[in-house]
Image (cartoon, helix red, strand yellow):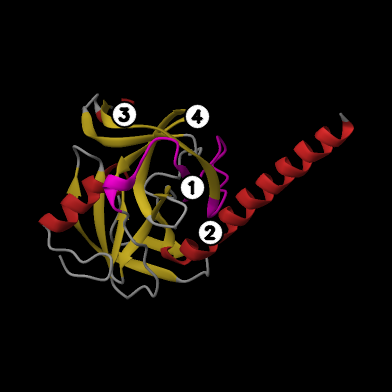
Amino acid sequence: MKKNYAIILILLLHTSLLYSQKESEVYKKTIASIGLITDRSGAVASGFFINPTTFITNHHVTEDLDIRSAKIEMKNDRIFRVKRIITESKINDLAIVEIKDEAEYTLELADGERIKRNDNVYSIGNPTDEDMNIDYFHLTKGRIRKVDDDSWFYETDNHYTHEAHVIQHTAMIRPGNSGGPLLNSDGQVIGINTFFYSDSLNYAIHVDELIQLLDKNDIAYNKTVV
């Protein structure tokens, strides 16, 4: 009996180490492409680069953004100044931002058809607590619970109804994670983290929604011009 317990303990430790190793791999592969977006108001949100001059975040992040003071801070302390908002889509809460300089690293967008229930996923962003303390470039892990069309509203947005194809997942997000990437085990973007209801009820806009917006505006991603 003791031998069986020992075997189980070894298996659990092995599984834990594998998860820890995978988290580290995803983080190292992607963190240089993920930023914190803010302005003189001090509001904090997240986002990521899909080409050297194009940064992705949420519409509810950019709608009140002060462009003159807006900046994107990277983990290596590099700072990019925002040039303009290329386009915003309020209905599915997405925004595409152009910077004045060029970023060196970008994220790859995943094939939306390969996103499945129970896949392992990772959220990276800049969550804040009730006192606005920031957990800079923080990673959480979880699984996909559901992929479906959904609608939601924000209390501060006069109950305007947003609609999109979304991914419900358990990789916990908080205020400040808005606009940050939801990643698969290969470090590819499968969604844009947008809202949550509880620790296990977190929602990301499906990457297909972003791809449609990029294609519509002829914006390059995955090292190609669409």
Disc 4 marks which amino acid?
Ser
Front residue of 139 and 20? 20
The rendered magenta stretch, by its main secondary structure, is classed as loop
The magenta segment: 111-138
The residue that mark 1 highlights is 122
Point out residue 116 in the picture as x, y percentages from the top left corner: 36, 39
In the rendered structure, the answer to whether residue 7 lies left or right of residue 181 reads: right
Q: Mark 4 or mark 1: which comes first in sequence?
A: 1
Question: Which numbered marker is on residue 200?
Answer: 4
Q: Indicate whether 119 appears above or below 21.
A: above
Q: Mark 3 or mark 1: which comes first in sequence?
A: 1
The residue that mark 2 highlights is 27
Q: Is residue 64 visible?
A: no
Q: Residues within 10 Å of mark 1 (few under 14, many from 20)?
A: many
What separation in Å lies between label 4 and label 1 (alpha carbons)?
Answer: 13 Å
| Callout 4–callout 1 Cβ contact below 8 Å | no
| Callout 3–callout 2 Cβ contact below 8 Å | no
